[in-house]
Amino acid sequence: MHNPSILHTTPVYFKKVLDYHNISHFPSKSSIPYISEYKEYNYLIDINSVFSNSPSGDVIDRTQSIAMPFKLHIARPWIVPLSNNLSLDESMNKRVNELSDYNEKINIFWSGGIDSTAVVVAFLLNCKNISQLRILYSTSSMKENPALFLALSSIEQLEMMEFSGDVYLNQNLDGIFITGDAADDLTASLDLSFYQEHGFDGCKQPWQDLFYNKTQNSNFVNFCEQFFQKSGRDITTVLEARWWFYTNCKIQKFPALASYILQPHQPLVIGFFDFYDFEHFMFWNTDSILSTPDYSSYKNQLKKYIFLYDKNNNYFKNKTKFNSNQLLKYRNKKIALLNQNAIMLLSDGTRIKTDNLPFLSEHDYRLKYQNSLDYLFDV
Amino acid sequence: MNNFYKTSTAYKVLDLINVERELLKSELVAYSKDPVRYSRRFRMLINLAQYEVNILTKLQNFYTDNADDLKTLMVDIIATEIKSLVDRDA
C-alpha cells in the first residue's frame, strides 16, 4: 500500500516544517510560500495571485506535469474528455447513485447556497431511499433559503439535523459526509469581488492582457500558454483561464478544509461535484458559466436544475454566489476548542500535529515523528 | 533558552483572553433577560476558560531552543483562535 500524501497544509506551521526538511522557501503574495528552484510551481502560485487579492490554499497540478517540491495528493488526475457524454441531469443522477451505493447514511451539509442546494435536490430527485439522507443545516441555511427549508421539513422520512449550537463540537454521526464543494472550482470560482473589479467584458477579454498587466513578466505569460494547453482545449478568455486554474489546481482545497469539522476517525468530506462527469460537462459548457452581464446569471445551469424541483422563481432569478462560511466558522471554533490544530492533513485522513500546537518547534516535531515523514519531502 | 519569550507570550495570551472575557462579562449583564443569548455568553465564558487552561499548559510544556518559535506569529494564531471561540455566529 502506498504511503499517504499531503492533502492540505496549514501554511503557518508548514513553512516551519519545510525548514526542518531543509527546503528553502521565500514569501509570495499567497499564504503559501514560493519554493526555491521550483519555478513552475511558483508560477502556479502567481496565477492564484492574478485571480485573487488574498490567495490562500495549496495549489496542485492534476496534469502531473509540473515538478512539485513535496508529495501533494492528487485524488483525480486530469483527463481530457473526448466527447460530451452526459447532460447535467444525467451526471447528477449518476453521482447520486454512486454515493448511494456506499449503503451508508449520507450526511449532506446544506448551507442554503446554490451548490449545496443543487446537491440536496439531486438526492431528492434520484436517491431511491430518502431515509438514507440526513440534512445538516444551521440557522444560516434557513436564512439563505427559507422556502426550501420549509419544504424539506415537511418531507417525511427525511432526517433534518440542526448542526449549530454545540452539536458540531461533539457529533459522532455515522455514514459519509457530502458538501457542495467543487462546483465553485469547476465553474471558475467567480467571486463577486473579481467580477466587480473586472466586469463582464473583463472576464471575456484575452487572459494574456490581464496576466501581463498584473505581473509585467512575459516568461510567466509564456509559461501559462504552455500550461493552459494541457487542458486539452482552447483557453482564450480570462474566464476560461480561471476555469482551468481552479479546476486543475484548487479543486481539493475546500473538502479538505471542511474535513476538520469532523472527528479525526470519521471519513474525509466528499465534495459532491468532484467527479469526472460533471467536470466533463463543464469542460464542454464553459460558455454557460456566465451567460449574460448580469452576475446573477453565474451558475445558471445549477439554478435551473434547482428550479425544476422547487419552482422558486425568486431564488432562480436573484440568488447569487455567496461565500457561505458558516461551516468554516464552526470548523475554526472546533479546532480552537478541541485542540484539533494540524500542520497538515494526509490523504488517508491522518492529521499531522504535535502535542503543543500552536507552539511548534523542531524538537516537538522530531520527538513525535522522527524521520517518518521524510518521504513526503523526498521528491 | 531562558524564560523571557515564554513569559512574554503568556502575558500576551492572557491579555487577549482578558479582553474577550471582560466583553462577555458585560454582555452577561446586558442579556440577563434574554435566555438564549445569556446562555450562549455563559457557554463562551466556559469555552474561553477551557481554552485558557489548554493554551497555558501547552506553553508550559513547550520546549524550544529557538526564540523565533515564540515570537509574534504564534500570538497572531492564538488571537485568531480566541476570536473564533467567541464568534457570535459560531
Image (spheres, coloured by chain):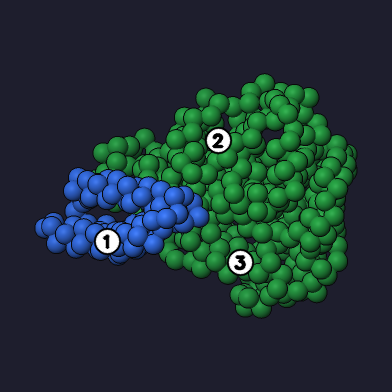
Say which amino acid is labelled 3: Ser
Whole-percent x and y of residue A52?
Answer: 61, 66
Amino acid residing under circle 1? Asn
Residue topped by disc 2: A268
User: Residue at 11% of width from left, 58% of height from top?
Assistant: B2
Tell me if mark 2 has few (under 14), some (14-19) or many (20+) residues whose alpha carbon lies within 10 angstroms of its own: many
Q: Nearer the viewer, mark 3 or mark 2?
A: 2
Pointer 3: what residue? Answer: A52
Disc 2 residue type (three-letter) = Leu
Distance CA(mark 2)–CA(mark 1)? 36 Å
* Badges 3 and 2, same chain: yes
Separation of marks 1 and 3 at Cα, in angstroms: 36 Å
Q: Earlier in the sequence, mark 3 or mark 2?
A: 3
For mark 2, name the chain.
A
- Please, is residue A27 above or below residue A128 in the view? below
Q: Position of residue A254 (x, y in %)?
A: 59, 48
- Determine if residue A377 is in view: no
Q: What residue is shown with label 1?
A: B18
| Of marks 1 and 3, the one in the foreground | 1
